[in-house]
Image (cartoon, rainbow, N blue to C red):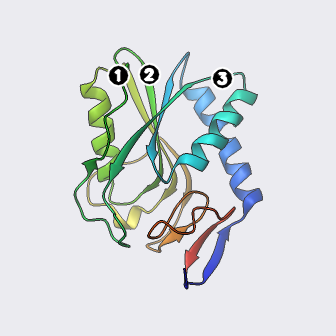
Amino acid sequence: MAEKVEILHDEAEIAARVGALAGEIDRTIPGDFTIVGILKGCFVFVADLVRDLDALDRRPRVDFIRLSSYGTARRSAGEVRLAAPAPAGIAGHKVLLVDDIVDTGRTLVYARELMQAQGAEDVWTCALIDKPSRREVAFTADFTGFEVPDIFVVGYGIDYAEDYRHLRHIGKIV
């Protein structure tokens, strides 16, 4: 962990944006729904998001799926892999997929198609970070936290080779 990290979004900015996203989700998704977080990078984001939804009297079920396209590299390998069994009991439920970053778009497209194949009633997508300049497939998340250029970000659950997840802010490696 020798790289230097420059802060892009501090704790207060992240908290405000996650709270705003919870409000957008509350106004958009009617009734009960299940959050399916895409591990590992989303775990901090999902925790804060469900607490903010709780403050709005929303109590979604929470489950996780483990997909991989990066490994320990800075660039996506271009192929999404299911690294653990998909959540059970999705049929007939509304699902909000939550990911840390939408980069190429492949991961959330894959996850959305997987939830639809399992019989989800409706599927929405949410990403904390959006890098539209890196998109390789047509995809736009329904809910987005922050847009960034083509830089490598870390912190707030997001890693580089399994390091930096512990940071309370989102930063870029310089």
Mark 3 crowdedness (10 Å alpha carbons): few <14, some 14-19, many ≥20: some
Disc 2 marks which amino acid?
Lys
Q: Which mark is residue 100?
A: none
| Residue at which label 3 appears | 58
Report the front residue among 115 and 143.
Answer: 115
User: Are the residues flagged by discs 3 and 2 in contact, CB closer than 8 Å?
Assistant: no
List the residue tagged with mark 1: 120
CA neighbours of label 2 inside 10 A, class few (<14), some (14 to 19), many (20+)? many
Mark before the other along the chain sequence, 2 or 1: 2
**Residue 6 relative to residue 65: left or right:** right
Image position of 120 with respect to 10: above or below:
above
Q: Is residue 38 left or right of residue 135?
A: right
Left or right side of 67 for 14 = right
Q: Which residue is found at the position 63% from the left and 22% from the top?
A: 59
* Relative image position of residue 113 (x, y in whole percent): 27, 35
For the residue labelled by badge 3, is the local secondary structure a helix, a strand or a loop?
loop
Residue 116 pos. (x, y %):
29, 27
Which amino acid type is marked by label 1?
A: Ala
Q: Is residue 158 above or below residue 125?
A: below
Residue at point 25%, 50% (across, down): 81
Callouts 2 and 1 close, C-beta under 8 Å: yes
Label 1: which secondary element: loop
Q: Secondary structure at mark 2?
A: strand
Please tell me how crowded label 1 is: few (under 14), some (14-19), or many (20+) other residues with Cα within 10 Å: some
Q: CA distance from mark 3 to mark 2?
A: 14 Å
Closer to the chain start, of discs 3 and 2, is 3
N-term-proximal mark, 3 vs 1: 3
Q: Is residue 149 above or below residue 116?
A: below
Q: Are marks 3 and 1 in contact (CB under 8 Å)?
A: no
Residue picked out by circle 2: 94
Q: Residue at x 75, y 29 (%)?
A: 55
Residue 83 locus on image (x, y percent): 30, 46
